[in-house]
Amino acid sequence: MTRSSSNIANAIADSTIDNMESSPLLDSEATETRGADVVDKADSNWDGYRDFEGLPWWRRPSVYWLLFPFAVFTLAFGGIIVPRLNLILDLVCRQYFADQKLRNPDVVFNPVLLGSDNPQCRIPEVQANVARFMLVMNLITGILSAIVAPRFGHLSDRYGRTRLMAFASMGGIFGEIVTVLAARFPKVIDYRWLLLGSALEGMTGSFTAGNVMSQSYTSDCTPPSQRAVRLGYLHACLFSGLAFGPILGGYFVKWTGNLLSIFYVAIGCHFFFIMVLRFVVPESLSKRKQLVAREKYEKEQELRSQAPTTWLATIQNANPFSPLKALWPTGPGTSPALRRNIVALALDDVIILGSAFSAGSVIILYSGYIFNWGTFESSRFVSALSMIRVFILMGLFPIINYFGRTRPAARRRAAGLVDTQVGADNLDVWVLRVALVSDIIGAVGYTLARSDKLFFASGMVTAVGGLGGATTQAMITKHVPPGRVGQLLGAVGMLHALCRVLGPVLFNGVYAATVKTYPQAIFVLLTATFGVALACALVVRPHGQ
């Protein structure tokens, strides 16, 4: 690069730092402007509240605005997890036996009935075909959402969270419509058209973009001292949907006598969620902050446009992984400790969420194959696991936060002590480590379980791991100013999407390859994965020490 290019790059870096409200490892000026984690300031004086002072309650953003629509959405989401998986299993199984009939016309095969118990499908060949097909579905959604999610995150810093959150949810509507058509007309629409639904879902950012938007919204309107608990509420809504959705969905299908009825309800819930986000939930980023972010972005673009165009600069601008630079901040106010914490926490968050999504469907397949669990048994397992996680996140975690953070901070204020350390504290770090240890113990239990009762109990042990997701997401947002939360979480979202690509390759691929010989191999892989996450958690130091 030329000298002028270097100067322009430095100017861009300086403009990025100028508007930072704080960073946990920055100087005293930055610490003063970000009062959320400085315990001598009350949460009521947090800077994030200032733009909404004097507004009526229905125009002030809060995570509580998201809870009801998100709970309705997750109930529908939870209600179709097992039916969707079993529907795909039946469709793939039907095609498998249709192919076998063509090769062996004289052999009589039992018909595969959608939504019914089909024991003939519990064979390794069908299990492997389902695992491979779901692998392709996740690859398509993961690759596309990896491209879209970080751009949505950065865009939301300039234009707000709610509109993009609603747009990301539209992909779910498209995906469910394709699923209904494939199941409604299986002789006309091949089950492989489900791949189109995966593509449409990925093009709108999928769950990854929606997750980034909801985390960014919560971070915008919640002081960091309460952020882990409030993010825990969102996770509790998700687990509530997973807990009660399968039960309610099972009763609804039984009441209607139609497996597809639950998919119609899911489409309606998607539409309801979009309408509430668009017209009811107040935006968490004020117009002032949006305009500041736009001006900063335009200034950066103008400076870049003045730089001499070289082939290297063109390649760098076209680099699809460029959003990941947000995970490695450089320039004034940063430090190796800051970068170490951000990278380690991002890896932890990706492993926790990626393992849940990549291994979840394989665990259901495994339990059906080894223990002959049907829809009822699988739904009961998912519901019990989720209910325990809800109790931990909404009942136990706020108590831990109160006695481990709120009361000690109040005592220090009463004693006149000033603690200017910010960023992730000791409580954050130890909650994360305990959560990962419980995941490891549960994964080892899965591996060794040879009875369904022990397998069920091992799943319950992993429920404590639900604390990990909310904690890591809160911790990582404490390391950047509010104006960069969307960009940082967008980069993490890109890693989530890439994990949706690589995760199924590992778990579905390993299961398909070992289901005949050693089906427990996926749990050995799961244990090793959580071991890596625990190693990353051990690297994280409170307050960037």
Image (cartoon, rainbow, N blue to C red):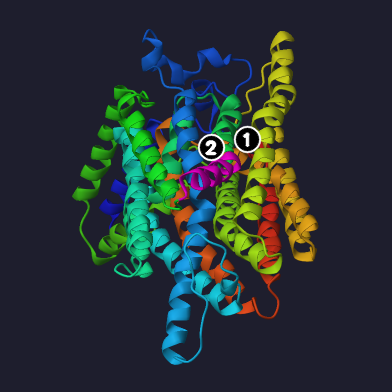
Query: What is the three-letter code of the residue carrying label 1?
Result: Ala
Give the class, few, some or many, for how many residues have Cα within 10 Å of label 2's Cα (few <14, many ≥20).
many
Q: Residue at x 47, y 34 (%)?
A: 72
Q: Which residues are magenta?
A: 242-257
Q: Position of residue 79 (x, y in %)?
A: 51, 46
Image side of residue 97 versus residue 430, left or right: left
Q: Main secondary structure of the magenta part?
A: helix
Give the class, few, some or many, for how many residues have Cα within 10 Å of label 1's Cα (few <14, many ≥20).
many
Whether residues under marks 2 and 1 lie with C-beta atoms below 8 angstroms apart, the answer is: yes
Image side of residue 228 versus residue 517, left or right: left
Residue 425 can be seen in this image? no
Calculate the distance from the C-alpha at mark 2 to the C-alpha at mark 1.
8 Å
Q: Position of residue 218 (x, y in %)?
A: 48, 30
Q: How many marks?
A: 2
Q: Position of residue 208 (x, y in %)?
A: 44, 49
**Residue placed under numbered mark 1 in the picture:** 424
